[in-house]
Each structure stands twice: as structure tokens, then as C-alpha cells.
Amino acid sequence: MKKRWAARKHFDRIAKKYDYYRTIDKEPIDFLTETVRGTEQSICDLGSGSGRYLISLIKACQSSAVLVKEAYGIDINPNMLETAEKKMEGLMPSINWVIASADNTGLPAQSISLVTAFNSIHYLPILGTLDEVGRILIADGYFAIYCRVLDQESKHIWGRWFPGYLDYSQVKTREFMTNFDSYNQSFQLIHVQDFTFERKTTLAWICEQTENKYYSTLDRYTLKEFNKAYSEFLDNIRANHTDLDDITYYSSYSLFLYRLSSIKRVKLTDNSLQSD
Ligand SMILES: C[S@@+](CC[C@H](N)C(=O)[O-])C[C@H]1O[C@@H](n2cnc3c(N)ncnc32)[C@H](O)[C@@H]1O
């Protein structure tokens, strides 16, 4: 509950500036529109935030002649959804922005063909969310999760150079993401696609992002810890980059694509094969 409240405060604070500080990646959207089968989709995006990925996904579907019958952006934070709502003028179909938690969307059972979660999975109550996704997806429906996993976080510029960052980060491990079936046997992992982006930036921009704590991980430090870590972070950046107006770093993510499967898996136990 404490964690949830801290996340709520963080997104309240950055809701209006969210898109300004964040980079949107087109590649996972293109990958999804090419990989997910079907000429029509009903889409539900969990932790949709300012809506930037959901809106891009709908536009990409439309450019690929995929009919989006309905679309829902689910988020627990009304300020983030308010930002989203302002952006969607003229978009067909209009998106239903729903203030709800991902584990209790209120959507009808078996009504959605594609559930997505971009950069949000580590905020969501995972077991309840998996049950809820299993409930709202149609048979053979898709669940696509785009996120950074821990090994990628450790190589990202903050994970690498900002002391304590990995201790405060809540991102999932790759192992967790590839073993959903041990939590909920309804899901079958059908594809993992890794993406690495080259980012060009300046020290001034990194400072602005850091001081505004645009990653919630930075908001979890006490003020004293943050000030100390920030000063070491700046030393690390200066020591490892010669041109502070032209810094290159790499940012990696993975897209995990699951499919709802009605087939129960067979689990190997000590001395027998048992269906569970
Ligand atoms: C890092 S943002 C990602 C937003 C968006 N998907 C994007 O990539 O631009 C995470 C979002 O998850 C939302 N969130 C946190 N807990 C949630 C929950 N239990 N149910 C639904 N949304 C939640 C936050 O309010 C926030 O908008």
C-alpha cells in the first residue's frame, strides 16, 4: 500500500510533464502490429499513463489496415489520464480512459483481443493483474508487455552510474518475465524481442531529468541520499564522457508477448508426472 501511494504521488507530480521527459520508441509498436495476428483488435492498455503508447498503437494498427473496434486506457492515476484525454482529438475509435487498477479493470469478461502494458508492469499488482488479463482476454488473445528488465536497467546510464539505483529500482528480472506460467498457467510466452536504442544527450538534459526525478526510482531516495548519490553520479558521468554536450548511451528494453492458452501445462514432480 505504501509503495502504491508513493507511485501515486510521483505520477501526480509529473503527469503534465510526462511526455516532455520521456522518449517514445516506435519499434515495439511496429513489432506488435506486424506480429499480432488478426484484422480487428479490441485493445486494453494497462498503466496507460499519458496514453502515448496506446495512441501510437492505434494509429499504427490503422496504417496497417487493422480495425481497432474499441480501446481502453486503464490507469490508477486520474492526472495521467487527464493528460491522455487532452491528446486524443480526432482519433477513431475514441479511447475510453478508465480510472481503475489493472487487477480490477471492470471490463467485461472475454472482451479484449490484445492487452498491453508499456513501462508499467513493475507498478501493477502482478498476480491479480494476471488473473484479470486472463479474465478479459478472448481465447487466444495476446498480452504484450514492454519493459526494461533488471539486467538492462543495470546497463542504463542511471542504473550504471547513479549509486543505489538498482536497490531502489522495482523492475522485474528477465527470469520473472519468462516464467509467468509458474504464477498463472493461462499464459504461454510466444516471443521475446529485445530492443536497444542509442540515445544522444547532454549533461544539462541529464541534470534536468534527474533533478525533476522523472524516473520514479529517483523519487524513492531520501533527500540526503539523493543529494549524495547525485553528486557521485555527476562525477561518474564527467569521468566517463569527454564531451558533455554530446553524450551517447544505450537504453535496452524487451517486449514479452504471451498468448492466453487454455491448455494446462504438465509439471514434472520428484517421481511422477502430474497434471495440475
Ligand atoms: C511509467 S508510467 C507508464 C505510462 C505509459 N504506459 C507510458 O509508457 O508512457 C506507469 C503508469 O502505471 C500507472 N499505474 C501504477 N499502478 C497502477 C495500477 N495498479 N493499475 C493501473 N495503472 C497503474 C501509473 O499511474 C503510471 O501512469
Image (cartoon, rainbow, N blue to C red):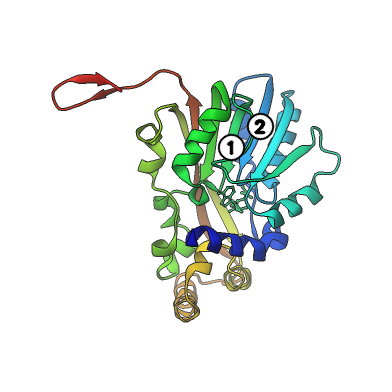
Q: Position of residue 272 (x, y in %)?
A: 17, 20
Q: CA distance from mark 2 to mark 1?
A: 8 Å
When asked about the image quadrant of residue 146, the answer is top right
Query: Where residue 158 sits: x, y (%)?
Result: 48, 64
Q: Position of residue 181 (x, y in %)?
A: 38, 31
Please say if 33 is above or below 201: above
The residue lying at 61 percent from left, 68 percent from top is 209
Residue beneath disc 1: 116
Q: Residue furthest left?
A: 271
What's under tag 2, amino acid-wise? Ile
Q: Tell me: 209 left or right of 235.
A: right
User: Residue 34, can we see it?
Assistant: yes
Tell me the residue that label 2 is attached to. Answer: 43
Pointers 2 and 1 in contact (C-beta within 8 Å): yes
Question: Please, is residue 206 above or below residue 255 in the view?
Answer: below
Circle 2 packing at 10 Å, graded few (<14), some (14-19), many (20+), is many
